[in-house]
Every structure is written in structure tokens, then in C-alpha cells.
Image (spheres, rainbow, N blue to C red):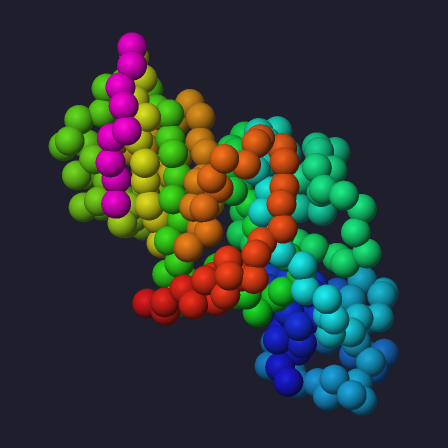
Amino acid sequence: MRLNKYLASCGIASRRKADLIISSGRVVVNSITIYDLGISVDELKDKVDVDGKRISPVGNKVYLLLNKLPGYVTTRSDPQGRRTVFYLLPNMKERLFSVGRLDYDAAGLLLLTNDGELANRLTHPGYEVPKTYRAWVEGSVSQDSLQQLTQGVTLEDGPAKAEAASLIRKAAGESVIEIVLKEGRKREVKRLCQAIGHPVRRLLRIGLGSLKLGDLEPGKWRKLSSREVQGLYRSPKG
């Protein structure tokens, strides 16, 4: 089994993030620090450690949906000492990680799990899993501006576009729009809106593939049903 897939099966991270863990020298196989992303391991014979701790495949898989509050990071720890979303969760023996990222000042749907294979399916660009956001932006958004989002704009890291964009409502000096993305670039919603002249004031993620935030209260969490998990696994590729 490829080492990154083994790390994912142990609930360490998705395969993409596992590659970063390996290349940074945090993985030791049979007392040898590994940097080669192409190495394979025998889960029955080889001894694998991450950050000095022995790991093994996950027995009990856990899936939690959290309505993230602004002012929390999605990592387990933060060099700046900011609060992490794990402060909002109960103490659990399973080691969970967040699927994808959600900005520090953003809110809404965040999936936490120890299922590395599902995390890989939901975050790998090849699967193009849609993510739906509700954005409160400055100014009055026109249909031309919405069309500009779906036709594409040029950002500092290349062309980008929304799969869909619609106006929810307008108020004095503010518009609320819904945006669907199939990419996962850093701060992409905010940069797209900035590019069309409507900076984001507030951002809420309300959907990830077939999973919806619904009426879950801010800062609260719940377990996913087996049907919801199956629905995420069925997310079409491409």
C-alpha cells in the first residue's frame, strides 16, 4: 500500500495532505525517516510512526458536521495561539481532522472525520465536488456582475470562475449572493468577489457535495447519518 494511502487509512489526513507530512520528514518507517512519496508499506509487517507516535488503521470511523464560528482556525493547533475548531467539539479518543479549509473569519459547514479516503475524494481537484457559499458583499450586485463570476475572472494565481452565482437579496449598500465552486483555492470566494468590485463582508459555507448545513446552530455539531456518508462517497467524479 502506498504510504500516503496508509496514512489516510490511519486517519492522519487525506492523501494530499499526507504527501506534505511525508515530504516534511515527519514519517518514520521501521526507524528510517521517509521523504519519498512513492514508497509502499506492508500494513502487517512495517512499523510506521508520525511525529514520534505509532499509527495503525482506523477501526471506528467518525463523521461530524460542525457549523464553524468566525474566529476559529481549522487546524488542530495554531502558531499564533488562535482558537481551533476542536475547542468546539467533545473530547474524543479518535483523532479527527477537517476536510478542506475554511477561513479564520468565515463560518458554516465544516466536515471533520478520521476517514482519509473520503477526505481525499472530497478535496481532490479531479472529483470536482461542489462547495456552496452564501456571501454578504458590499454594494448592489448586478446580473452582469454575476455573469462575470461564472464566465471567469483573472486572479493573481490564474483564471478562476464560479460554477454558479445567484442573487439572494439586496439591502441598503449590501447584497447577498450564493456562489458554487468546484475548486479549492485559498480565499477564492473573497478574491472572486473582490475582482468584480464587491468585497465580502461575511462568508458562510452552506454545502459540500450532497451535504447541507441546514438549520444547525452556529458553534454546534452533529454526527452524519449513514445515508449522508454514502451520499458523499457517491459524489460524481468530474
Question: Is residue 158 left or right of 120 when viewed as pictured?
Answer: left
Pick the residue in front: 136 or 82. Answer: 136
At x 18%, y 46%, the residue is 151
At x 57%, y 56%, the residue is 225
Spot occupied by residue 118 in the image (x, y as percentages of width and height): 55, 65
Q: Is residue 167 magenta?
A: yes
Pick the residue in front: 97 or 94. Answer: 94
Pick the residue in front: 178 or 17. Answer: 178
Spot occupied by residue 213 in the image (x, y as percentages of width and height): 48, 42
Pick the residue in front: 134 or 32. Answer: 134
Please name the predominant secondary structure of the magenta segment in the image.
Answer: strand
Question: Is residue 88 left or right of 110 when viewed as pictured?
Answer: right
Question: Is residue 163 left or right of 95 when viewed as pictured?
Answer: left
Indicate the quadrant containing the N terminus: top left, top right, bottom left or bottom right. bottom right
Q: Residue 181: in sight, yes or no?
A: yes
Q: Residue furthest top?
A: 172
Indicate the quadrant containing the C terminus: top left, top right, bottom left or bottom right. bottom left
At x 42%, y 23%, the residue is 201
Vertical arrangement, residue 6 with respect to residue 218, above or below: below
Location of residue 169 (image quadrant): top left
Vertical arrangement, residue 22 with respect to residue 196, above or below: below
Spot occupied by residue 75 in the image (x, y as percentages of width and height): 66, 46
Vertical arrangement, residue 235 with respect to residue 133, above or below: below
Location of residue 56 (image quadrant): bottom right
* Stretch of the chain drawn in magenta: 164-172
Question: Is residue 231 left or right of 198 when viewed as pictured?
Answer: right
Q: Residue 22: in sight, yes or no?
A: no
Spot occupied by residue 197 in the image (x, y as percentages of width and height): 27, 26
Location of residue 70 (image quadrant): top right
At x 38%, y 34%, the residue is 134
